[in-house]
Image (cartoon, rainbow, N blue to C red):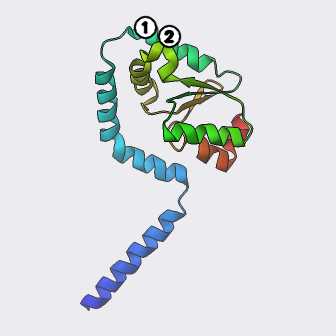
Amino acid sequence: MLQTNFFTSVVALLFLAHVNAFVPHAIRAAHTRLHMGFFDDLKQKIVASSAGEYDVPMVSSKLDEIVKSSSSGVVMMTFQSCPYCVKAREVLDSNSIPYTDIVLEDLDSGALKGPLRAELGKRFKQTSVPAIFLKEEFIGGANNGGKGGLIPLLASGEFQKML
């Protein structure tokens, strides 16, 4: 009897794992997002703390300016050597999608890097880069966030519809 219960439990777990493999990415991402909330909040607090004191209205206005500059296409905020930023550039280039790349280290000699990430966290609940905007809508990073991220949106065809 014990072997039957164990076998049944193992089969049930394998079935659930198999079924989860076919659950759409958006549903898995939403489920993960619920569980990662504590860490997201912690990350936002760390980024805000590391940004130090800054002129909130000025930085918020700069973020507004960046978002509005995406009204006719794609704008992304990046770090020069971040692997996810490099990947996002490669994906956009290989799909012949024009974009504006705002390298945070180059803005005001890097002084806005921390404050802009802190404002991203407040407004879009994401402090990491790349932060990609399409027609003034935050779509996320390379793989997640916002509307799911650049690569999943391209793979599903949603990015092309939004473009």
Amino acid carrying label 2: it is Ser
> Residue at image x 24%, y 89%?
2
Q: Secondary structure at mark 1?
A: helix
Task: Reply above or below: 6 against 104.
Answer: below
Q: Residue furthest left?
A: 2
Quarter of the figure with the C terminus: top right
| Above-or-below relation of 21 to 34 | below
**Which label number is shown at residue 82?**
none
Circle 2: element type: helix
Q: Are marks 2 and 1 in contact (CB under 8 Å)?
A: yes
Residue 159 image position (x, y, % from top left): 67, 40
Q: Position of residue 43 (x, y in %)?
A: 32, 34
Q: Label 2 belongs to which residue? A: 61
| Residue on which disc 1 sits | 57
> In which quarter of the view is residue 53 placed?
top left
Q: Nearer the viewer, residue 67 or 93?
A: 93
Q: Residue furthest right?
A: 96
| Residue 141 visible in the snapshot | no
Visible in this render: residue 43? yes
Mark 2 surroundings: few (<14), some (14-19) or many (≥20) residues within 10 A: few
Compare residues 87 and 24 and report the one nearer the observer.
87
Q: Residue at x 72, y 30 (%)?
A: 98
